[in-house]
Image (tube, grey):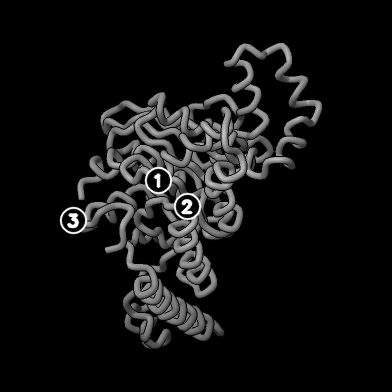
């Protein structure tokens, strides 16, 4: 499948997964992959602590978050023809302020937010905070602020509640602007040509179990279209793992110090075990959830920066190219 066509197929990519699987890193890689094929990308995060600017070489360890205002993460252009990558965070309070100001209520908007009125409304109508955020995402998508919007959702458990908010509010609020907003958001989420959910996991038993449960919950309770599953942190298979370290050293003409042969043997054993584990879990994921898979390599780096994001983005593009062109995005194979 042509990557440009892939990123043109869905204008909103919603990235979801349990904490610790690299969901935000995958979000950055998807945005960069879109940029590499000339599609401008806007990354939206909702928790305010993703560290995305650092992944694109901006900010400091103490100042690595995003603000409500859009921020340029990577400028496009140049010989590779890449497009801009921008990012912002969307909070319920910020979205409410903007909504009120757009409707001529700027004089009282800040007073309403600082008074705690939103907390009162949220208690009376569960899901209102989430619908404010999703409503703003819907507005950005309709406005065409970027070719692709990549939404970094909360961790898996909250992600289901987050995406279910529109249906919940439709059931509890029958008329008025909240009902209209919820209906518009639900229409976007259920439109598989505009929106798809990208689930992220590690090749390990618990993350795979949780991803499968999340996938079925999202399809049953929200009706979203599921795109390819991203399996993050894949170890490459290496030749020579079964070789005897001492014999291999002699063949290479080097001498090992005391204890090094044992350390190398233990490292090779760990690598073999890890590869066997991931093969088993990737196959189990394929059996339980028949969706295309995008497999990203494990990076032996303590911090993800621009170079690492580029490596992952190229892996995303390579995986997309080998996807069966006949696979309908958002549907099982």
Q: Residue furthest front?
A: 174
Nearer-the-camera pick, 172 or 284: 172
Does 83 appear above or below 186?
A: above
From the image, tell me which residue sits under label 2.
222
Quadrant position of the C terminus in the picture: bottom left
Expressed as whole percent of the image width and height from the top left, the position of residue 195 reads 38, 43
Q: Earlier in the sequence, mark 1 or mark 2?
A: 1
Expressed as whole percent of the image width and height from the top left, the position of residue 24 reads 52, 48
Residue sitting at 45 percent across and 70 percent down?
Answer: 203
Q: Are marks 3 and 2 in contact (CB under 8 Å)?
A: no
Q: Which mark is residue 207?
A: none
From the image, tell me which residue sits under label 3.
326
Residue sitting at 54 percent across and 43 percent down?
Answer: 166
Residue sitting at 64 percent across and 34 percent down?
Answer: 92
Residue sitting at 40 percent across and 28 percent down?
Answer: 142
From the image, tell me which residue sits under label 1.
190
Dot 2: element: loop
């Amino acid at each position: 499948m042509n990557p440009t066509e892939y990123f043109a197929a869905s204008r909103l990519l919603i990235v979801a997964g349990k904490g610790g699987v690299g969901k935000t890193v995958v979000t950055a890689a998807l945005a960069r992959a879109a940029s590499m094929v000339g599609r401008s990308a806007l990354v939206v995060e909702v928790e305010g602590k993703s560290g995305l600017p650092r992944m694109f070489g901006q900010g400091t360890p103490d100042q690595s978050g995003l603000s409500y205002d859009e921020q340029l993460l990577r400028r496009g252009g140049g010989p590779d023809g890449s497009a801009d990558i921008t990012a912002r965070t969307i909070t319920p309070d910020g979205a409410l302020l903007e909504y009120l100001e757009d409707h001529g209520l700027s004089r009282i908007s800040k007073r309403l937010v600082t008074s705690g009125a939103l907390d009162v409304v949220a208690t009376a109508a569960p899901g209102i905070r989430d619908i404010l955020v999703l409503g703003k995402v819907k507005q950005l998508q309709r406005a065409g602020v970027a070719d692709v919007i990549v939404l970094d959702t909360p961790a898996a458990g909250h992600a289901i509640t987050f995406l279910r908010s529109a249906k919940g509010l439709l059931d509890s609020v029958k008329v008025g602007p909240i009902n209209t907003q919820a209906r518009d958001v639900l229409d976007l989420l259920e439109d598989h040509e505009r929106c798809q959910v990208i689930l992220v996991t590690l090749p390990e038993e618990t993350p795979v179990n949780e991803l499968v449960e999340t996938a079925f919950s999202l399809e049953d309770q929200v009706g979203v279209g599921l795109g390819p599953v991203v399996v993050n942190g894949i170890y490459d298979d290496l030749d020579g793992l079964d070789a005897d370290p001492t014999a291999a050293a002699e063949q290479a003409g080097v001498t090992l110090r005391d204890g090094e042969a044992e350390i190398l043997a233990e490292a090779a054993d760990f690598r073999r075990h890890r590869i066997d584990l991931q093969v088993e879990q990737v196959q189990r994921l394929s059996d339980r959830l028949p969706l295309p898979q995008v497999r990203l390599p494990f990076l032996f780096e303590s911090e993800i920066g621009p170079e690492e994001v580029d490596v992952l983005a190229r892996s995303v593009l390579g995986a997309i190219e080998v996807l069966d062109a006949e696979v309908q995005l958002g549907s099982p194979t």
